[in-house]
Image (spheres, helix red, strand yellow):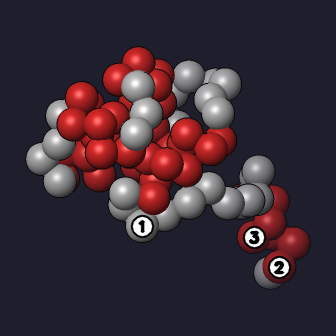
Amino acid sequence: MEENNLQSFVKERRKRLGLTQEELSFKAGVGLRFVRDLEQGKSSLQMNKVNQVLKLFGYELGAVPANREDLLHEEG
């Protein structure tokens, strides 16, 4: 995926399901502007609204290591 994994994930899933941004916003119960901001990688988004969108794909936000390369070196 690209630099911003969340934005890429949402955009890719939406397109895979054949949904427009407007359709996704309606199904998720969020505004069209929010979906656009999410897909454009806006840095400050409400987590509850992100989870509303992700729920349509069977996902939710979660904690991941900030630098996965460092984690790999520590474990190995």
Q: Give the farthest residue toward the right.
A: 74
SS assignment at label 2: helix
Residue 34 visible from this viewpoint? yes
What residue is rendered at 55% in x and 40% in y? 49
Whether the residues at callouts 2 and 3 have beta carbons within 8 Å, the answer is yes
Residue corresponding to mark 2: 75
Q: Nearer the viewer, residue 48 or 70?
A: 48
Q: Is residue 13 above or below residue 64?
A: above
Residue 8 visible from this viewpoint? no
SS assignment at label 3: helix
* Amino acid tagged 3: Leu
Q: Position of residue 52 (x, y in %)?
A: 49, 48
In-image side of 32 versus 46 (left or right)? left
* Amino acid tagged 2: Glu
Q: Count the marks.
A: 3
Image quadrant occupied by the C terminus? bottom right
Q: Give the farthest residue toward the left.
A: 18
Residue corresponding to mark 1: 58
What residue is rendered at 73% in x and 59% in y? 63
* Amino acid tagged 1: Gly
Q: Is residue 64 above or below residue 40?
A: below
N-term-proximal mark, 1 vs 3: 1
Assess disc 1: are there few (<14), some (14-19) or many (≥20) residues with their C-alpha within 10 Å of its C-alpha. Answer: few
Residue corresponding to mark 3: 72
N-term-proximal mark, 1 vs 2: 1
- Front: mark 1 or 3: 1
SS assignment at label 1: loop
Assess disc 2: are there few (<14), some (14-19) or many (≥20) residues with their C-alpha within 10 Å of its C-alpha. Answer: few
In-image side of 42 versus 31 (left or right)? right
In-image side of 13 versus 30 (left or right)? left
